[in-house]
Image: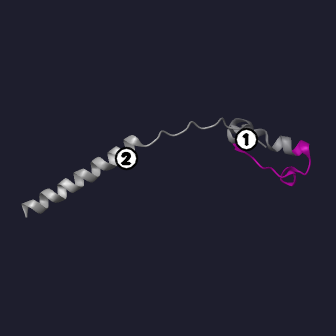
Amino acid sequence: RMVLLVLFWGGWLGMLGAAAAIVAQAPRCQPLPAKAWWELGALYRAPPKAFGGDLKGESRGLGGLGGSHGGGL
């Protein structure tokens, strides 16, 4: 019984050591490329019909989006 217990824990510690060695030897991640402007913030879609059908109505209706840190419309 004691031999099986030692074999179990020895195998468990061996697998843990092997996993740590694999992680330590793995190549490092490459740095991410620079993001384009459209990847930096949220994009909003606003159909003109929702704001009166013209650009003046749309610009009035979208006034509240200025503080929302959006990236584009």
Q: Nearer the viewer, mark 2 or mark 1?
A: 2
Q: Does the magenta segment cover residue 49? A: yes
Q: Which SS class for mark 2?
A: helix
Which quadrant of the rendered structure holds the N terminus?
bottom left
Question: Observer-nearest residue: 21 or 63?
Answer: 21
Residue type at the position of mark 1: Trp
User: Could you tell which of marks 2 and 1 lies nearer the N-terminus?
Assistant: 2
Image coordinates of residue 13 in percent, x first then y, are 23, 51
Residue 67, above or below 51:
above
Residue situated furthest left in the rendering: 2
Q: Is residue 41 visible?
A: no
Label 2 to label 1: alpha-carbon separation? 38 Å
Which quadrant of the rendered structure holds the C terminus?
top right
* Left or right: 29, with 33 as reference point: left
- Number of the label disc, if any, that sits on residue 38: 1
**Residue under label 2:** 22
Residue situated furthest right in the rendering: 54
Q: Does the magenta segment cover residue 59? A: no
- Residues tagged 2 and 1 counted as in contact (Cβ below 8 A): no
Residue situated furthest bottom in the rendering: 1
The answer to which image quadrant residue 62 occupies is top right
Q: Around disc 2, counting alpha carbons within 10 Å, would you say few (fewer than 14), some (14 to 19), or many (20 or more)?
A: few
Q: Which residues are magenta?
A: 42-57
Image coordinates of residue 4 in percent, x first then y, are 12, 62
Image coordinates of residue 70 in percent, x first then y, are 71, 40
